[in-house]
Amino acid sequence: MPRIDAFLKLGLAQGCSDVHLAVGVPPMLRMNGDLVPIRFRELGGPELESYVMEILTRGHQDRFRGGEDIDFSYVSEEGGRFRVNVFRKDSGIGAVFRSIPSEIPTIESLALPPIVAKLCDYHQGMILVTGSTGTGKSTTLAAMIDLVNSSRSLNIVSLEDPIEFVHRSKQSQVLQRELGTHLPSFAEGVRAAMREDPDVILVGEMRDSETISMAMTAAETGHLVLGTLHTTSATKTIDRIIDALPIEEREQTKSFLSQSLLAVITQALVKRPEGRGRRAICEVMVMNRAIAKLIQTDQTHQIPAQLQTGKDQGMQLLDQALLAAVKAKEIDPDDAYAIATDKKGLSKFVVDRSLLPQFDI
């Protein structure tokens, strides 16, 4: 058994989301959003590198020694599945193992807004799940793909870096392709997918203008495209897409967004009360005529007002969702306050009063 599996086994037993290994510090576990060191000595450079090399393929070893960071999925002998990133830093090697549940969660078990399930009924257009790193975007997308897989007879092509949740074909056929293993880039993956008779294309990360452009083309030509961006609101997502493409394509991009973008779901992970894990809280934008007009007339700064008043269409601001979850005692009010943009509505629920602004008398 690879020696690194002992740390992973401990992490799984503790219910952590990530295991961090780095030179000069003991192994650490991400527990409910916080990094907690385990009782172990500080890891040395040669020691940690020997641990990691035991689980790398020959190709991964060559790429890593050539200076590249390595992303891959790993199944330990204990049965746990992990998304792995191996890298070098100033003090030596480092590795992060993100635990992937063996069972694909459902939209209901994640307590996502009901509109998320309704969006899975669309046949054409683009749905984006956004948020900062580690906010559960991949988990939400996996739940959406599983719902489509279980309820519709379609061809689903999933492009991932690396493959995380493993989907077994149910009512649909699910083809999972991995960056670096089956395809050279997301853009090439989307281009190839459109020749594979797809109904649904999942783009693991729309990280560059070429990928965004290809995904837009796929959505415009009769496919349902699901994708992610590292943006923290619906407004920032739209601005990011417009800014990512050449200036001469700006009007065309705004036209695409107003006609083919179905929704933006922006997530944050917030602690549950009394440290019982974390749950996703979502801002939701669903495209309608008013938002489409704001995009076309360069008034995206007014989109939050549409989200605030669009409850009957399934829309909500992140601040509204945080406040509702705090009132229902579903999340920790202090953590919600720290994440909120407009903190006024949450201030009266804060337990740790030191978080509140201090004023001189």
Image: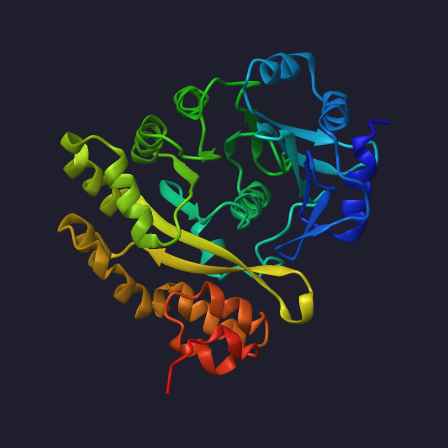
Residue 159 in sight in this render: yes
Residue 334 position in % (x across, y down): 54, 71
- In terms of image quadrants, where is residue 171? top right
Residue 327 in sight in this render: no
Residue 320 position in % (x across, y down): 41, 70
Q: Residue at x 40, y 33 (%)?
A: 207
Q: Is residue 296 above or below residue 352?
A: above
Q: Residue furthest bottom?
A: 361
Q: Is residue 26 above or below residue 278?
A: above
Q: Residue at x 52, y 79 (%)?
A: 353
Q: Is residue 220 above or below residue 133?
A: above
Q: Nearer the viewer, residue 229 or 296?
A: 229
Residue 244 position in % (x across, y down): 27, 35
Picture quarter with the C terminus? bottom left
Q: Residue furthest front?
A: 361
Residue 164 position in % (x across, y down): 62, 35
- In terms of image quadrants, where is residue 118? bottom left
Picture quarter with the N terminus? top right
292 relative position to 360: left or right:
left
Q: Nearer the viewer, residue 291 or 132?
A: 132
Q: Residue at x 13, y 51 (%)?
A: 297
Q: How is the image coloured?
A: rainbow
